[in-house]
Image: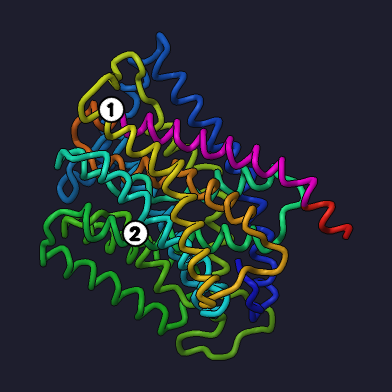
Amino acid sequence: MGASTPHTPHARLWPLRFVSVEALSGLVLLAAAALALGWANSSLAPGYEALWHLPLGLGVARYLPAHDLHFWVNDGLMTLFFLVVGLEIRRELHDGSLSDPRVATLPILAAVGGVIVPALLYVLVNTDPVARRGWAIPTATDIAFAVGVLSLIPRVPAALRMLLLTLAIIDDIAAILVIAFFYSGGIAVAGLATVAGGIVLVLVLQWLGARSPLAYVLPGIIVWYGMLSAGAHPTLAGVILGLLTPATAAFGRFKRVPSGTPSPVEHVEALLHPYVAFGIMPLFALANAGVSLGGLDLSAGAPLTVGAGIVLGLVVGKPLGILLVSLAAVRSRVCVLPDGVRWRHMLLLGLLGGIGFTMSIFISNLAFADAQLLASAKFAVLVASALAASLGWVLGRAQAPAVSAAARA
C-alpha cells in the first residue's frame, strides 16, 4: 500500500494477500447485492422483510433489549468489519504507506479531495435539511469492489494498486470520523465510563503479554456495549480496538519473542479478514441492498434530489475531487506521481473511488429514518457504484494497450 519498505516479511507479503482476498470478495459482495435486490422485488419479498425483522434477544434482555436481525448485522457483526479497518490503519501507520509522509501525501490529499467535492455536490443538489443529512453518503469508497474491478483490468501499474488501497483506507478514516461526529446521538457519560473500563482491560491484558485473540473478546464486548450505551455508534468500538492492537511482535512484559513471530495486528487481521470479506460483508449486502423498486418514487421531491446527489457525488464528484487535488498537489511540487503512473491512471483511480457501496449504504442507514429517503439513497448507491465500476473498467481496458506499448518502449 505504498512504496515504503515494510519492516517484516509479513508486512511485505500483506498487500498481495490483501489484494487477492479483496478482489475475490468483491465478486461475492456483488452476488449478495444482486440476490438481495432480486429477492426484495420477487414474490418472496415478504419473507425478505420478515427475516431481517426477526427479533433476537440473545438471552441478555436485562442488559440489552431485544433487537432484530438487521440490527445485529449492521451494529453487531459490522463491528468486526470496522475492527479490520482499524487494524489496517494501525498497521499502515506503523510500517506502511501512512508511516512515510513522502509516500502518503498524494493518496491522502487525493482522498481529501474525493471526500470534499462529492459532499459539496450533494449539498448543492439538496436544499432540504432532512435530505442534507445524507451529505456523507457519496464520500465513501468500497475497497472490495474497487480492488475487484481493478483486478479485472490487465497491465495496471503496481503503484496504482497501492494508491487505491491507501486512498480507500484514508476514506475509511474519514468515514469513521464522520460517523463519530455527525451520525452519533448525544453522548452519555455512563456509557463512556464503560468504554474506558473496557479499554483499561485491553491495556492490562497487553501489559500481561496476553497473545490469544480470545482473551480480548470480553473487553471488546464491554467497549461495544459502552459505545451503544453512550449513544455513539457501537461499530466504532471495532476501530478503537483495532487502533489499540500492538503493531510489533514484542509487547507487554515479554520483550523477547521468537524470530518471525507476527505482530498482533498482522495475526488478528489475517485471522479475521477472510471471514469479514467472505462472510460479514456479503451478509451486510444481503441485509441492506434489498431495495423494493415497486414502491420507490423518484419522480420528484427529496427522494429524487437525494438519489441525484448521491449519483452525482460518486460518479462525478469522486473522480473530479481526486483528480483536481492531485493535479494541484503535483503542480505545486508537494508530491509527485509514483513511477509508471500517469494522469490517465489517476482518472481511473477517481472512477474506482466512486464505487461507494458498503460504507455508503452503511451511512445511508444512519442518515435517514424515512423509509422512502432510505430506499432512494440505497438505490442511488447501487446505481452509482455500478456506473462508476463500469466506467472504470471500460477506461482501464481502453488504457491497457497504451500501457503495454509504453512498457515495450
Q: Is residue 382 above or below residue 134?
A: above
Q: Is residue 125 above or below residue 328?
A: above
In which quadrant is the N terminus drawn?
A: bottom right
Residue 381 found in image quarter:
top left
Q: CA distance from mark 1 to mark 2?
A: 27 Å
Decide if residue 376 is on the left or right side of residue 109.
Answer: left
Q: Residue furthest top?
A: 43
Q: Which residue appears at 51% of the width and 77% of the height?
A: 334
Quick one: label 1 or label 2, which is nearer the N terminus?
A: 2
Decide if residue 173 is on the left or right side of residue 154.
Answer: left
Residue 137 got which mark?
A: none
Dot 1 lies on which element? helix
Q: Residue 108: horizontal and vertical position, in percent?
A: 47, 67
Q: Residue 148: horizontal and vertical position, in percent?
A: 62, 44
Please tell me whether residue 385 belongs to the stretch shown in magenta.
yes
Image colouring? rainbow
Please tell me whether residue 386 belongs to the stretch shown in magenta.
yes
Q: Where does the magenta region start and end?
A: 375-402
Residue matched to label 2: 176
Q: Along the line of sight, which residue is nearer the eye, 198 or 25?
A: 25
Dot 2 lies on which element? helix
Amino acid at the residue labelled 2: Ile
Q: Residue 300: horizontal and vertical position, in percent?
A: 24, 22
Name the main secondary structure of what is drawn in magenta: helix
In which quadrant is the C terminus drawn?
A: bottom right
Residue matched to label 1: 304
Q: Can residue 77 be seen at all in this image of the molecule?
A: no
